[in-house]
């Protein structure tokens, strides 16, 4: 039998898509998502496609050794110089470079230059192209926010389901654990962990932040389970011999999780904002990882001499957060059980 949405769910989604702010948020978010997730097509020092001496290459996506192109004095291929040299020696070479032919890690001698036709949004304090770092940094932020939402919800939903269904001692012990997590100073723990591990990697930072974030999701799902676990369909399932896990994940969870899903956009935006703050303070991702927070920090330092370093990441971060929050407000309006 084909799966069908219930009339109530269809009505809620129709309400969502009839809201102008929902479309504004969706269009704004999808624009940023598509550009950042396909960053190699828009900004890269390597060609997207290259034909050299009758052979095809895709340097932007595949790694080739320098010896493959006859480069013996370096382990890294400078494709711009290679194409220029081939043209001078009349070797048949064709290369399709991205619109912005700069890598986010590539340093140049043009330090703190203003926006120009060469560097659309200028360069930073190390001579790196701001456009490239903005696009790749946005991808890092979005990936972080989406993973933060996914892990927080998976942990929170699992623990909240068990806590709310079994109640009693399980509920008491879990509540004490959540209270312990909530009273710990978040920023101090991040600094301590990064110091002890001698690392501030993407995954370590994500793990520490998720450790402090699942409790709110768990509490909301616990409240849903406490109100649903004694309903008639749950009692009927027990009478029919259904196991506890089946009752939790088949009968109760689908009815309890809908109000929680309306928090998804706000959780994603919270993850993005948290990473930006940590990077701004210097406790986030390790250099030279592209980061909106790192650009903001540079912008604050050089605001009098290079205002574009502050304006660019501020506009990008505001665009993302406003778009995501517009989606969240529309979802909350559409799925509000009182309407």
Image: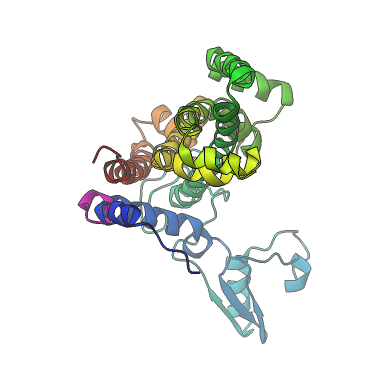
Considering the image in quadrants, where does the C terminus appear? top left
Q: Nearer the viewer, residue 335 or 264?
A: 335
19 in magenta: yes
Q: Nearer the viewer, residue 324 or 291?
A: 324
On screen, residue 203 above or below 175: below
The answer to whether residue 261 is left or right of residue 163 is left
The picture places residue 45, in percent across and down from the top left corner, at 56, 61
- Residue at the far front in the pictured view: 239
The picture places residue 257, in percent across and down from the top left corner, at 46, 41
Name the image quarter holding residue 57.
bottom right
The picture places residue 214, in percent across and down from the top left corner, at 54, 30
The picture places residue 39, in percent across and down from the top left corner, at 50, 58
At 59% from the left and 39% from the top, the residue drawn is 238
Name the image quarter holding residue 243.
top right
On screen, residue 227 above or below 133: above
Q: Nearer the viewer, residue 339 or 120?
A: 339
Q: Nearer the viewer, residue 274 or 174?
A: 174
At 43% from the left and 34% from the top, the residue drawn is 270
Tally the marks.
Answer: 0
Q: Main secondary structure of the magenta part?
A: helix
On screen, residue 175 above or below 124: above
Query: Range of the magenta residues?
Result: 16-22
At 57% from the left and 17% from the top, the residue drawn is 175
Asked if residue 166 shows in the view, the reply is yes
The answer to whether residue 32 is left or right of residue 59 is left
115 in magenta: no
Q: How is the image coloured?
A: rainbow
Asked if residue 127 shows in the view, the reply is no
């Amino acid at each position: 039998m084909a799966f069908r949405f219930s009339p109530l769910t269809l009505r809620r989604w129709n309400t969502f898509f009839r809201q102008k702010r929902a479309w504004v948020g969706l269009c704004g978010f999808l624009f940023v998502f598509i550009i950042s997730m396909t960053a190699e097509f828009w900004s890269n020092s390597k060609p997207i496609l290259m034909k050299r001496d009758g052979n095809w290459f895709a340097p932007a996506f595949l790694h080739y050794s320098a010896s493959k192109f006859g480069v013996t004095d370096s382990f890294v291929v400078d494709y711009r110089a290679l194409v220029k040299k081939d043209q001078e020696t009349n070797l048949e070479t064709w290369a399709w470079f991205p619109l912005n032919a700069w890598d986010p890690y590539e340093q140049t001698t043009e330090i703190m230059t203003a926006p120009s036709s060469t560097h659309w949004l200028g360069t930073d304090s190390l001579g790196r192209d701001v456009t490239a770092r903005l696009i790749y940094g946005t991808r890092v932020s979005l990936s972080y926010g989406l993973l933060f939402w996914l892990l927080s919800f998976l942990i929170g939903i699992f623990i909240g389901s068990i806590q709310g269904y079994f109640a009693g001692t399980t509920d008491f012990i879990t509540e004490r654990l959540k209270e312990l997590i909530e009273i710990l100073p978040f920023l101090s723990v991040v600094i301590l962990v990064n110091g002890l591990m001698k690392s501030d990697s993407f995954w370590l930072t994500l793990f520490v932040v998720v450790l402090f974030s699942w409790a709110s999701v768990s509490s909301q799902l616990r409240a849903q389970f406490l109100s649903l676990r004694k309903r008639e369909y749950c009692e009927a399932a027990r009478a029919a011999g259904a196991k506890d896990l089946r009752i939790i994940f088949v009968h109760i969870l689908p009815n309890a999780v809908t109000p929680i899903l309306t928090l998804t956009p706000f959780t994603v935006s919270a993850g993005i904002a948290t990473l930006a703050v940590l990077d701004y303070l210097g406790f986030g991702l390790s250099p030279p990882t592209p980061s909106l927070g790192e650009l903001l920090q540079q912008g604050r330092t050089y605001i009098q001499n290079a205002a574009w370093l502050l304006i660019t990441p501020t506009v990008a971060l505001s665009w993302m957060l406003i778009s995501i929050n517009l989606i969240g407000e529309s979802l909350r309006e559409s799925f509000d059980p009182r309407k």
